[in-house]
């Protein structure tokens, strides 16, 4: 009986041990956390877009349908009433259309852009630059459209 219990325990433990590494995320991920911003850094912006680093600059990973979206920011944390420059890379075809909404603002236009870019930002897709000045603190959603693709960024803006 004792051998049966030990054997059954070993059989159950092996699959658990083998699967325990699956929850750690992508092995090849190059995103490194930036200490000043976290995924859940503001009420109502949960989850916010993941922010890491790309060659020393804050990089934001967007979420999309039929598209990938990456953005480089000039600095984090984002602050209300200060210019924020974003360099975007989004896959898909067609022109880029952007709609931005946040606290009390259903449609915030960028100060400039989207302007096609040609920098050395090495992510898939076409490149554009946008400059925003978010008028208030809170959770801001940038929704980007191309012909058959849509992607978004959720940004926490602090006072």
Image (cartoon, helix red, strand yellow):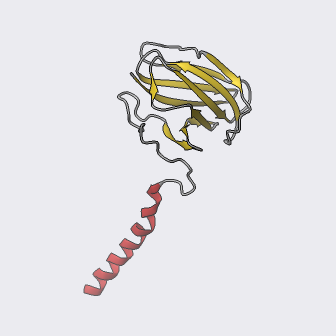
Residue 139 in view here: yes
Q: Residue at x 47, y 59 (%)?
A: 22
Would residue 134 appear left or right of 125 to someone viewing this image? left
Looking at the rendered image, the quarter that the C terminus falls into is top left
Looking at the rendered image, the quarter that the N terminus falls into is bottom left
Residue 1 in view here: no
* Coordinates of residue 152 in the picture (x, y in percent): 55, 30
Q: Is residue 139 above or below residue 33?
A: above
Q: Residue at x 46, y 42 (%)?
A: 34
Q: Is residue 152 above or below residue 50?
A: above
Which of the 4 image quadrants contains residue 55? top right
Which of the 4 image quadrants contains residue 122? top right
* Coordinates of residue 80 in the picture (x, y in percent): 44, 19
Q: Residue at x 38, y 36 (%)?
A: 40
> How many numbered marks does the figure carry?
0
Would residue 87 appear left or right of 49 to someone viewing this image? right
- Nearer the observer, 150 or 84: 84
Q: Residue at x 45, y 24 (%)?
A: 79
* Coordinates of residue 119 in the picture (x, y in percent): 71, 34
* Coordinates of residue 105 in the picture (x, y in percent): 47, 13
Q: Is residue 40 above or below residue 80?
A: below
- Nearer the observer, 157 or 83: 83
């Amino acid at each position: 009986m004792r051998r049966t219990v030990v054997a059954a325990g070993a059989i159950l433990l092996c699959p658990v041990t083998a699967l325990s590494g699956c929850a750690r995320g992508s092995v090849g991920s190059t995103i490194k956390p930036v200490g000043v911003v976290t995924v859940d850094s503001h009420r109502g912006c949960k989850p916010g877009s993941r922010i890491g680093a790309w060659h020393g600059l804050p990089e934001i990973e967007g979420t999309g349908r039929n598209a990938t979206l990456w953005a480089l920011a000039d600095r984090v944390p984002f602050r209300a009433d200060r210019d924020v420059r974003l360099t975007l890379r989004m896959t898909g075809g067609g022109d880029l259309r952007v709609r931005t909404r946040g606290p009390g603002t259903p449609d915030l236009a960028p100060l400039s852009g989207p302007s096609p870019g040609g920098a050395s930002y090495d992510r898939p897709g076409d490149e554009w630059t946008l400059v925003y000045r978010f008028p208030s603190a809170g959770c801001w959603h940038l929704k980007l459209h191309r012909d058959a693709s849509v992607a978004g960024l959720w940004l926490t803006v602090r006072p």
